[in-house]
Amino acid sequence: MRGIFFAGGCLATLAFAPLAWRWLLPPLLLSWCYLCLTQSPRDSAKYGFWFGLGWFLSGTYWIYISVVVFGEAPVWIAMLLMFGLVLIMAAYIALASWITSRLTDGGPWRLVAVAPAAWVLVEWLRGWVLTGFPWLALGYSQIDSALSGWAPVVGVYGVSYLLVLSVAALLAAICIRGAGRWAAFGFVLLPWIIGGGLHTAAWTAPLGGPVTATLVQGGIAQDRKWLPEQFRPTLDYYREASLRARDSDIIVWPEVAIPSVTDRVEGYMKMIEADARQHGQTILFGILERTYGNDDAVAVYNSVIAVGGEFRQAYRKRHLVPFGEYFPVPDTVREWMRLLSLPHSDLTAGASEQPLIVTAGGLKLAVAICYEDAYGAEQLYALPAANILVNVSNDAWFGDSIAPHQHLQIARMRALEAGRATIRATNTGISAFIGPDGRLTETGPQFRPVSMTARLESRSGSTPYVTFGNWPVISWASLLLGLGLAYAKRGH
């Protein structure tokens, strides 16, 4: 049984990009629901843990690539970090399994009420507890299915909820007799039918005419990015690519496209600024922004600088990567890391809410750096004011793995939730233009220099998800679990 559920978890990864075999999830979730319906809470948690172990081990193996291959950390540190994360994520699946079994107590209709609520609450919790890891939320796998029509209404967690609801209802329909079976089939089909219809809804509206945007991908491998001999060719490539796009309104370079700190390349930044002003453009580029306080305190931010308007603007990354951009360890451990020549310095997090980037043409851009866009609710402060979304990333850290494909899937969900076109510029791919419906309008190849130009619609207005965020889904799931707990206590 353990091996079967472990193998099932491994198969669940195939439902996400790049293969996107989303049809795998209903039978896998059906097995999970049957487990919770027929087994004790203890056994459900045990086998649910093995399902989660297979799922997150196969779905996040790319952490090893970033830590060992490019981070050059010892293998044992990579194993500790990777397996520690996988065990924590598997424990969340075990918790959802235990809660579902405990509150269902063998009742098919109670399964329909409890299973999707327990799953989505645990999925939401793992997205923010201890800074969170929202990767592989079930809803992302449905970006190209009928259920994605719900995303502008209830967000990715709502899509997860409806997927589990339809599967739990299918199991209930198999188990029960009489008229109740047809009611259960209604819960199976309605989320898909309504979701398909919601694709025709126009939640946001075009604002003015289309704008021309260019994204530039350097295609520089992570192990070459910071080499001294690569520095000047990198700067020359990005400037020359931007000069060739002189008819574009917006030009976006990737995360830390300039491999330096701001005070060391001031002359180059002034040159880019002059180019942008000459052509009436706004150019956004990633760089490490170094500032000095009155007390000589130094702060380094992972920033996007925008030039071309009356003054420079900056967005500073707010949600930093633990053990990548900051190290939540005691000073003694930090000193030990320094002695071993391991990364040990912290970047500084930007403010939780920051002014939007305003282009030379007056459009407002909401910027997210790297995996910040996996935290959808954290981006809502910028909406509905923002007209276009921008995501810059450096997925070169993950090599030729599934991570860049999954990250693009996440960016598509953010565009669909917000009803906004998205410009996604990465160092080695996958760079893309994404429509406000979440569809890819143009993508570039990985690991090659790319300059792509597209016409984008700026948008105004709010989707229901922009207005209410995750709270309707989380409140509803909490209510159902509360009622389930009260029922279970009364029954015993």
Image (cartoon, rainbow, N blue to C red):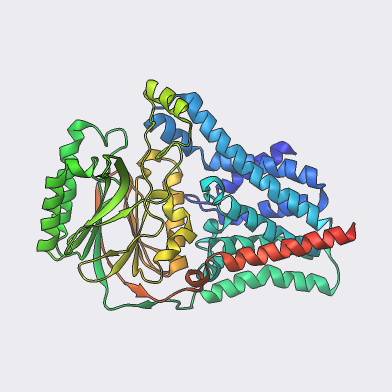
Q: Is residue 166 visible?
A: no
In the depicted view, which residue is nearer to us: 119 or 339?
Answer: 339
Q: Position of residue 440 (x, y in %)?
A: 39, 62
| Residue ID at (38%, 54%) | 351
Looking at the image, residue 259 lies above or below residue 122: above
Q: Position of residue 281 (x, y in %)?
A: 17, 63
Question: In the orientation shown, which residue stands out farthest toward the top?
Answer: 339
| Left or right relative to 348: residue 140 | right
Quarter of the rendering containing residue 447 = top left
| Left or right relative to 177: residue 385 | left
The quarter of the image holding the C terminus is bottom right
| Left or right relative to 256: residue 380 | right
Question: In the orientation shown, which residue stands out farthest toward the front?
Answer: 295
Quarter of the rendering containing residue 203 = bottom left
| Left or right relative to 48: residue 489 | right
Q: Is residue 222 visible?
A: yes
The quarter of the image holding the N terminus is top right
How many numbered marks does the figure carry?
Answer: 0
| Residue ID at (47%, 69%) | 466
Q: Position of residue 315 (x, y in %)?
A: 31, 55
Q: Position of residue 320 (x, y in %)?
A: 42, 46
